Amino acid sequence: MDLRISPSRVRGTARAPPSKSYTHRAVLAAGYADGALVTNPLFSADTKATARAVEAYGGSAERRDGDWEITGFDGAPETPADIIDCANSGTTMRLTTATGGLVDGLTVLTGDGSLRSRPQGPLLDALDQLCVRADSTRENGQAPLVVGGGTSGGDVSIRGDVSSQYITGLLMAGAVTEDGVAIDLTTELKSAPYVDITLDVLDAFGVEATVVGGDDSEIRASGADGFEIEGGQSYAPDGGSYDVPGDFSSMSYLLAAGAIAGDDELTVEGAYPSAQGDSKIVSILESMGAAIEWDRTAGAIAVGRSSLEGIEVEVADTPDLLPTIAALGAAAEGTTRITDCAHVRLKETDRVAAMATELERMGVETEEYEDELVVHGGGLTGATVRGHEDHRIIMSLAVAALVADGETTIEGAEDVDVSFPNFFDVFAALGVECTEA
Ligand SMILES: O=C(O)C1=C[C@@H](OP(=O)(O)O)[C@@H](O)[C@H](O)C1
Ligand SMILES: C=C(OP(=O)(O)O)C(=O)O
């Protein structure tokens, strides 16, 4: 579906969709348990892939009203009767490949063309250190993957600068091994707040894990040398249920829209503090000059239109904000420099290159380096742009389109279903003029 967006003003109140990262973990943790009710989960293409994996390992996942009723496999996943199709979801593949390592039989995991081009080698190598069979069928460190054979746990060394999802997968699976898993990081950990989200969910399910080292920042996993998780633990959330908080990566598009195209104030509800690093979008907007206020107790963020100025911002911990910041930079005065972003090239698409290409198509000057994206603000002009089959590229270009000179057509806009299925309905309700092209 191609979508045409006219320059528009936004106003009113929107609710943040539930967190994709928390939903993945809660659904899988409920799978490791003997079940749980996951309340207010995100139902999206990616989280449905994790629910399918839980079913493949012997659990079940039923939608009950707005909740997900999960029956678990109680720490003992079964050999799947069929391959697991992780679709477009890196989180599903990394987290449930580690689950497959626990099974005596073999599990085959695959996904769409994008997912089959993303790196899985460090995780396969870590599983190999735990005496699990862990192969890439094409021997290129990419899916399709074959894992299995079972493990009693052990020690692994793994790099932390490709994907934090490997660490999350090993921790979640490690808790139900006999001996537990000790993870030694051989490089700096990128995307550290996502490990904090994991620790948060593990804690809520009564599972303990330890951070080794760390730099004493608010982010527990930041600067960590490693992690340890004891074996023989059971997953069981307090009261049998787990409630998913709102998603700050998804909120970033709404807040960015309010900051560049707000007509009066725009309010986003469901914005309670959690371990999500992407809540940094609030301070990023503030430092660009936006009038933004976060009432943490009420879970509401109000933002008004301001003239924004370019800033320098590093995204080591917040890779998913790069497309949003690039769109904001395009609408701002001056230069926006997004640094420490090499790992952002390993997502659904190379997001550094994709944003540079599509913003250039919209008349914005950019400079692209291996680890840095520079956006020279101003000159946004409507154009036909490609969504790169990547939800975050699509939503960020939709934000830029609000203040472009002329109409913008985004090709392949339906791919927002990966993380924010009703994004364009929410956009329309806020006053954005968008129609199918
Ligand atoms: O664990 C998670 O939920 C995620 C971790 C991050 O990936 P990396 O750890 O691969 O950077 C992030 O980009 C992704 O959208 C979600
Ligand atoms: C990279 C993302 O997700 P995943 O790694 O799960 O595909 C994302 O949602 O931006």
Image (cartoon, grey):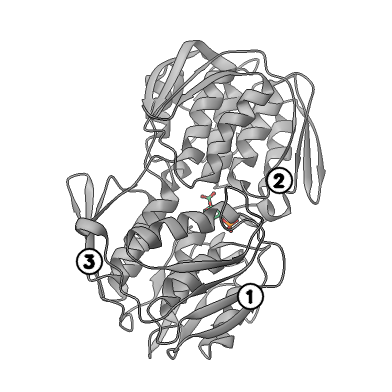
Q: Which of marks 3 and 1 is nearer the N terminus?
A: 3
In front here: 181 or 85?
181
Read off the residue under disc 2.
Answer: 352
x, y percent for residue 404: 64, 18
Q: Residue furthest front?
A: 216
Whether label 3 touches label 1, CB < 8 Å: no
Is the residue at mark 2 in contact range of ligand 2, meaning its CB lies under 8 Å from it? no
Query: Of the residues shown, which amino acid type is indicated by label 1?
Result: Asp
x, y percent for residue 351: 66, 47
How far apart are the alpha carbons under marks 3 and 1? 31 Å
Q: Residue at x 40, y 87 (%)?
A: 178
How far apart are the alpha carbons under marks 2 and 3? 40 Å
Please indicate, yes or no, whether residue 62 appears anywhere in the rendered image.
no
Query: Of the residues shown, which amino acid type is indicated by label 2?
Result: Val
Read off the residue under disc 3.
Answer: 35
Badge 3, how many Cα within 10 Å: few under 14, some, many 20+?
Answer: many
Q: Residue 152 occupies which quadrant of the picture? A: bottom left
Q: Earlier in the sequence, mark 2 or mark 3?
A: 3
Q: Which residue lies furthest to the left in this view?
A: 64
**In this view, the mark in front (2 or 3):** 3
